[in-house]
Amino acid sequence: MNRTSSASALIAGLLLVVGAAQATTGGNQVMINGKSVHGETVAATPNARVVNVDAGKAINVNCGDVVTFQSAAKSFTWKFNSATHRALDVRDIAPAGFSDKKLTVYVSRNEGEGA
């Protein structure tokens, strides 16, 4: 096999691995370890920011922020440990049956992550 063929095979293999690492589960991208690229569900804390999903269209958060999302009588708390730092729809991380309302979450790097 020549170098061009070897390089092409290597690139194709890497693309398959990256694709597997960013597989989706119901819109929520997951890594190879099965965790979301956006963060994780955590227990509610008194200092978590509270956001009513039904009252807005978009919010800004920093990586590392903990947010409790509420809709009607339902709620869940999420810690944004984003691997991608890009916008997502709260429905992508919400538990099944939480809300059908779209709320865009813009995730920025925190001060400790640099530019």
Image (cartoon, helix red, strand yellow):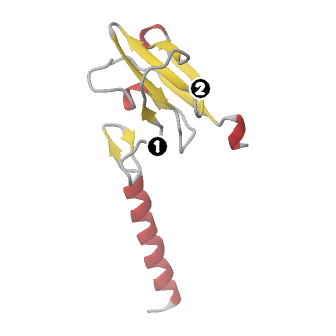
Which residue sits at x=43%, y=78%? 9
> Does 12 appear above or below 87?
below
Residue 37 bears which disc, if any?
1
Q: Which residue occupies the foreground of this view, 108 or 113?
A: 113
Quadrant of the drawing holding the C terminus: top right
Residue 102: x and y in percent read 41, 20
Give the Cα separation between the discs numbered 1 and 2. 15 Å
* Residue type indicated by callout 2: Val
Graded by Cα atoms within 10 Å as few (under 14), some (14 to 19) or many (20 or more), the crowding at tag 2 reads some
What is the quadrant of residue 94 in the picture?
Answer: top left
Could you say whether the residue bearing mark 1 is in a helix, strand or loop?
loop
> Does 102 appear above or below 79?
above
Which residue sits at x=59%, y=34%? 63
Residue 26: x and y in percent read 30, 37
What is the quadrant of residue 49 in the picture?
Answer: top right
Q: Which residue is the site of mark 2?
A: 61
Which residue sits at x=48%, y=38%? 38
